[in-house]
Image: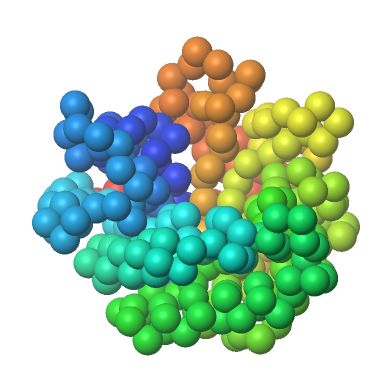
Amino acid sequence: MSWGMSGMCGEIAEPLDEQIAGLRVLGVPRANLTKLRLTADGPALSIDELSDEQLAELRQRLDASGIGCYCVTSPVGKYAVDTDEAKVERQLARSIEAANVLGSRWIRVFSFAPRDGSTGAEDRDAVKDAFARLVRRIETDGDGAVALLENNYRMYTLDGDSTRDILSDYKPEQAALAFDAHAYVASETQPFDEAWDAVAPWVRVLHLKDYVAATGTIVPIGQGDGQWPQIMRAVDPEVVEDLALEPHLHNSAYGKGRDGLDLFREARDVVLTMLDATGKPRPATNVN
């Protein structure tokens, strides 16, 4: 898979038509689908809540637009390791089915969190076993999609060492990493200085957002503590496949009252400028 750019397009708007139109305007050909409205007045549904018929309709509309579903950004594993297995099974099964229907490259998952009142060290074996079940199930039932772990400050993957601990049992072709600098900052980890070297062999996607630790504030990429210039200089475009726009600015004081597409455009432009400054090639930004 070549060096490219994707968008967590639920941050543009909830209606699918607006998500697709926004990606097309920005020239971003890859959609990371998490929550959407198939009709303007319909309910907002998570990607794992869509029926077979709705998935078929979604595939048809994406194909007609020239946009591909790059990642099914599921909520699987974004809760405690002792969460009801029926919930995990339902979300995982539907996420795999979505990836199969949509031809997705990745299924985003999380590492689970320790049980309430427990610690990562105490629940390490349970967390690793639960994550292993996710990977095996995706390998067995998926049609080529790969588990994509996103580190998260509320989960087991608080820092570089814990993230590496989860991934060390797998080749990147089995379980890769979406590197989230924002999440590392939120857990008081310096993303480049303290995490990058530990996890770099598994990084295939960069989740592009930034955060100021002292104020707990989401900010435009490059304006926070995410150490993005250092990360961009270190990235190998022959290894890392994707720059995933997920600015989160629609939920921030910075973006309050502003149009979601305008915030996305600003994030894209900052990333492209940063690539230029660090000597990395710009990914293709066009839609057929």
Q: Quadrant of residue 118?
A: bottom right
Q: Is 189 situated above or below 219?
A: below
Q: How many marks?
A: 0
Q: Is 25 situated above or below 3?
A: above
Picture coordinates of residue 285, whole percent (x, y): 41, 48
Q: Residue at x 78, y 66 (%)?
A: 120
Left or right, 218 with reference to 101: right
Residue 74 in view (yes/no): yes
Q: Is 15 situated above or below 173?
A: above
Left or right, 102 with reference to 279: left
Picture coordinates of residue 7, whole percent (x, y): 44, 46
Q: Quadrant of residue 156?
A: bottom right
Q: Residue at x 82, y 36 (%)?
A: 213
Picture coordinates of residue 54, whole percent (x, y): 16, 52
Q: Residue at x 80, y 71 (%)?
A: 122
Q: Residue at x 54, y 62 (%)?
A: 83
Residue 24 in view (yes/no): no
Picture coordinates of residue 123, whole percent (x, y): 74, 71
Left or right, 280 with reference to 102: right
